[in-house]
Image: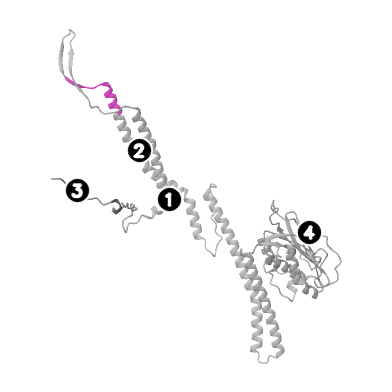
Amino acid sequence: MRPRPRFRRPSRFRKPLRFRRPSRLRLPAGTRLPAFAHSIRFRLTVMYSTLLFVLTALVLGGIYGAVAASTDAEPITDTARADKIYRFPDGSTTKLGEVEVVKVQQVERAVNYETQQALQHYSLLMLAGLFVASLGIGWVLSGRALKPVRAIARTAAEIQATDLSRRIRLTGPKDELRYLADTIDSMLDRLDAAFAAQRQLIDDASHELRSPLAIIRANLDTVLIAPDAEDADRRRAVQVVDRATTRMTRLVEDLLATARRSAPAFHDTDVDLAVVAREAAEEFDSLAASRRLTIERELRRGLTIIGDHDALRRAVGNLLSNAVRLAPAGSRITVAADRAGGWLWLAVKDAGPGIGRDEQDRVFDRFWRGPEARRSPERRTGLGLAIVRHIVEAHGGHVRLFSAPDVGSTFVLWLPVAGGDGGAPQAPPETDPLAGRTGPAPPARAGGRSSGDPSSR
């Protein structure tokens, strides 16, 4: 009987073979590894032990392979029977029995075979013992190596946002962990200084706002509660409240400007210092003329830096505001800009009361007011020069003050040259670029200019 032929589908109708990706090994539901198995110490121990086990296995395997390749080893498989004959002295012999004999080569092979079996047995025992010992040694060594990490984590956990005085101060060799601890300490120093400055700013602002608020409250209570208050009393109270609100408005504006200067939100572009100084001086020409003051310009063209035009104009404006307010009537205020080496400078010089040497270090502090400002009926916020310093330092520059009592003050803004090949020097010159530029004050006029101002030509 002939077998039935099997029907085969054409290849285009066959289903393609699909290979399923083997699923990852998963633990049964509800099974959790112990806590130590999730630690980096456990992973380092397993990694160290596994690496040592593999290296030792390779060495022992290489030795075993070399021995096996250089020797001929096999058990005894071919034996023969021989008669054991004893020969007497007279030459006669007698048969004592039969013995089993093998060839000498087979004996050597058998010895080699037993040696290889012993080597393999002891090598496996050595590998097992070495793996167990490496686990213990690796656990101890990794614990000692990670001890500084635990110290860093413990100290960081104890540090709170309200108390940043704690430091890690890790001792020991200068390795990567020591570098990490020193970096964290440096970061904590900067954070502590920033939080301290923020708390000081909040305390100072609260103190400065408390006085005008108390003045407003007292005058309003006096006018509203007193039944016999006259119109003159009300007008006087309104004037006092107006001055207090003006002072509060100026303080809030200065605080907002300080916060903006502290944030990295500058609109960097090419800025001409001569244009910045000229625009700032034009804003104070009318006020200077009303006080019989002259603002002279000694500006040079082509003093270009990369920075924020409005921020730099505000810095110069703050300097001119102080100069116009403190300079004696009939005197001259000089605004100059030029180049010195790898730096550009912009200076504002006045003939005001000057600042003593013991107070020059504090003049750029927030809410600091000199003796003249404290005696003045026009209360200031004490943030103007602090804002100037923030703006200049944000542009990579420095502020210098040259002043003497009853002589006047010169504020110099040193700014690095934009796109210099060799870069700016480490520090700007410590000399006054306007020293020696004195002379009789010219007649007061609005918008006074000297021949050094390009815009006057």
Dividing the picture into quadrants, the one containing residue 351 is bottom right
Q: Nearer the viewer, residue 261 or 278?
A: 278
Label 4 residue SS: loop
Measuring 21% from the left and 24% from the top, which residue is drawn there?
Answer: 79
Nearer the observer: mark 4 or 1; the answer is: 4
Q: Which residue lies under the disc numbered 1? A: 41
Q: Nearer the viewer, residue 448 or 327?
A: 448
- Report whether 26 appears left or right of 212: left
Label 1 residue SS: helix
Nearer the observer: mark 1 or 3; the answer is: 3
Among numbered discs 3 and 4, the one appearing first in the sequence: 3
Q: Is residue 372 visible?
A: no
Question: Is there a contact, CB below 8 Å, between mark 3 and mark 2?
Answer: no
Nearer the observer: mark 3 or 2; the answer is: 3
Question: Is there a contact, CB below 8 Å, between mark 4 and mark 1?
Answer: no
- Amino acid type, mark 1: Arg
- Amino acid type, mark 2: Met
Q: Residue furthest top?
A: 90
Q: Residue furthest bottom?
A: 228
Q: Indicate which disc residue 5 carries.
A: 3
Above or below, comparing residue 314 to residue 88 in the picture: below
